[in-house]
Amino acid sequence: MAAATAGQLRVAAGLYPEDAELAELVRELGDGSETFRTLRNAREVDVRTSGTQSFRHPALGTITFRYENFVTAGDPRQRLVVFVPAADGGADAAVRLLTTWTRTGPPSPVER
C-alpha cells in the first residue's frame, strides 16, 4: 500500500508541478520517512482506480472493502471514492454491526 501511495503522489506531482501544497506534502513526507524516500526514489508510478482495501478495526479485526475512484468533471484533482463491503472480507456484517454502536464504543458482550 505504501508503494502504491508513493506512486500515486509521484503521478500527482508530475501532473501538477506548480502545486506548492503538494510539493510541501511530498517534501514533508520525505523529510519524515526513510521508507517514503526509498519508495519515491524508486520512480514507480501508480494510478489506482479500483481495487480492494483492508482496514484493521480494534474490535472487529480486519475488514475488507472493494473501492472505486471517480474523478469529478469540474475538477480532476478531486475524487469521490466509494467503498463497498467485499463479499469475502467480512465487511458486510461488520458495517451492519458498526452502525448499531454509539459514540461511546461497542456494546458490551451482554448487550449483543
Image (cartoon, rainbow, N blue to C red):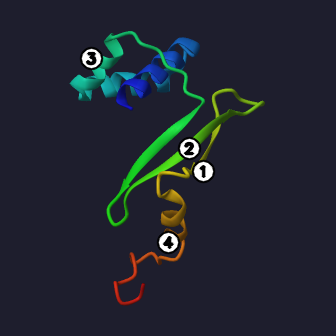
For mark 2, does the 10 Å Cα neighbourhood hold few (<14), some (14 to 19), or many (20 or more) residues? some
Residue 53 lies, with reference to residue 104, above or below; the image says above
Query: Could you tell me which quadrant the C terminus lies in?
Result: bottom left
Disc number lying in front (3 or 4): 4
- Residue 45: x and y in percent read 47, 15
User: What residue appears at the point 30 percent right and 24 percent down from the top-left corner?
Assistant: 36
* Residue 86 or residue 78, whichever sits in front: 86
Q: Residues within 10 Å of mark 1 (few under 14, many from 20)?
A: some
Label 3 or label 1, whichever lies nearer to me, is: 1
CB of mark 2 within 8 Å of CB of mark 4? Answer: no
Task: Give SS at disc 1.
Answer: strand
The amino acid at mark 4 is Leu
**Which residue type does callout 3 highlight?**
Thr
Which residue is disc 2 drawn over? 66
Q: Residue furthest left?
A: 34
The residue positioned farthest toward the right in the image shown: 73
Query: Residue 78's spot in the image, x, y percent?
Result: 64, 34
Q: Give the percent coordinates (x, y) of residue 16.
A: 57, 16
Q: Is 49 left or right of 35, judged from the image as shown?
A: right
Rendering quarter of residue 41: top left
Q: Residue at x 27, y 17 (%)?
A: 38
- Residue at 47% x, 58% y is 90
As shown in the figure, which amino acid type bears the numbered disc 2? Arg
Label 4: state its secondary structure: helix
Q: Earlier in the sequence, mark 2 or mark 4?
A: 2
Q: Which residue is mark 1?
A: 84
In the rendered structure, which disc, 3 or 1, sits on the residue that comes first in sequence? Answer: 3
Asked whether the beta carbons under mark 1 and mark 2 sit within 8 Å of each other, the answer is yes
In space, the residues marked 3 and 4 are separated at their CA atoms by 39 Å
Label whose residue precedes the other's in the sequence (1 or 4)? 1
Residue labelled with disc 4: 97
